[in-house]
């Protein structure tokens, strides 16, 4: 039987004089799942997301990504693994304000060895995929919030990741636009079998996922189909 895409075992994370943020967290996520991680502010869910994205490391315990123990990898190896496997979508979009939309999308491909022409061609394909083909030469401040989040999704997809981590991706959007963004995630999961892990504190957003992990005070309070 194949290893799960993600395997978290006995994970702890401490900050500031050993104050625990995550306490004995364990779970597996299989390839193709759509999972919401839900909790109130300060519950530890964003810290957990950062560890899953190889942006932070645990104090104790293990996190295996595609069977590799991330604690045993160097920072360069983590960066390569992150770039190859993971696409990120953030609440604040995190677009470079002075770069064009196409250049923002192409940015993760800088480490791929592709030429500038190849990077822009791939970025154009992704921009078309999220319905914004005509906006490639514009700057982020010339787009609406919903359009900027579509650009962020295109950027997350440009490396053909197996996993997308989305941290409060609708937090800065109105309800209708948020629903449109969630439909994109649903299509990516169902049509392309991309694994989606969504961090949110909103019940209606978490309801789009097929599995719900609730985090309370740094521990898994529940883990069930939604």
Image (cartoon, rainbow, N blue to C red):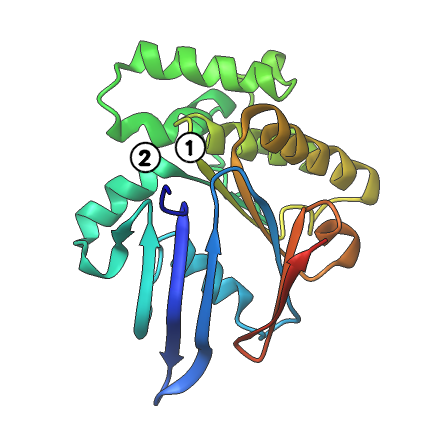
Question: Of marks 2 and 1, which one's residue comes earlier in the chain?
Answer: 2
Q: Residue 112 at x, y = what percent? A: 26, 26
Residue beneath the point at 56% across and 21% down: 138
Instruction: Tell me, for residue 84, which label it has, or none.
Output: 2
Q: Residue 185 at x, y = what percent? A: 63, 35
Q: Left or right of 164: which side holds 210?
A: right
| The N terminus lies in quadrant | top left
Q: Decide: is 47 above or below 183.
A: below
Residue where numbered disc 1 is placed: 161
Q: Left or right of 154: which side holds 113?
A: left
Q: Residue 202 at x, y = what percent? A: 74, 58
- Nearer-the-camera pick, 117 or 66: 66
Judge the density around disc 2: few (<14), some (14-19), many (≥20) Cα neighbours within 10 Å.
some
Q: Decide: is 46 above or below 20.
A: above
Residue 144 in view:
no
For mark 1, give the secondary structure. loop
Cα separation between marks 2 and 1: 6 Å
Residue 102 in view:
yes
Q: Left or right of 59: which side holds 179?
A: right
Instruction: Tell me, for residue 107, which label it has, or none.
Output: none
Which residue occupies the extreme front position in the image? Answer: 1
For mark 2, give the secondary structure. helix
Mark 2 and mark 1 residues within 8 Å of each other at the beta carbon = yes
- Nearer-the-camera pick, 34 or 3: 3
């Amino acid at each position: 039987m194949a290893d799960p895409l993600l395997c978290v075992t006995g994970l702890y994370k401490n900050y500031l004089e050993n104050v625990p943020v995550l306490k004995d967290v364990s779970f597996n996520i299989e390839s193709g799942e759509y999972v919401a991680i839900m909790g109130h502010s300060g519950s530890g869910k964003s810290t957990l997301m950062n560890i899953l994205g190889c942006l932070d490391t645990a104090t104790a315990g293990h996190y295996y990504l595609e069977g590799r123990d991330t604690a045993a990898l160097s920072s360069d190896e983590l960066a390569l693994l992150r770039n190859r496997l993971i696409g990120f979508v953030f609440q604040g979009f995190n677009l470079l304000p002075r770069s064009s939309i196409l250049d923002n999308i192409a940015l993760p491909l800088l480490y791929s060895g592709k030429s500038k022409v190849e990077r822009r061609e791939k970025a154009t394909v992704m921009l078309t995929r999220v319905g914004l083909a005509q906006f490639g030469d514009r700057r982020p401040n010339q787009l609406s919030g919903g359009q900027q989040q579509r650009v962020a999704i295109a950027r997350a997809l440009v490396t053909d990741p197996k996993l997308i981590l989305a941290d409060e991706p609708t937090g800065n959007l109105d309800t209708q636009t948020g629903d449109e963004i969630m439909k994109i995630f649903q299509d990516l999961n169902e049509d392309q079998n991309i694994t989606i892990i969504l961090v949110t504190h909103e019940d209606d957003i978490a309801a789009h996922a097929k599995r719900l992990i609730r985090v309370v005070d740094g521990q898994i309070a529940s883990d069930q189909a939604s």
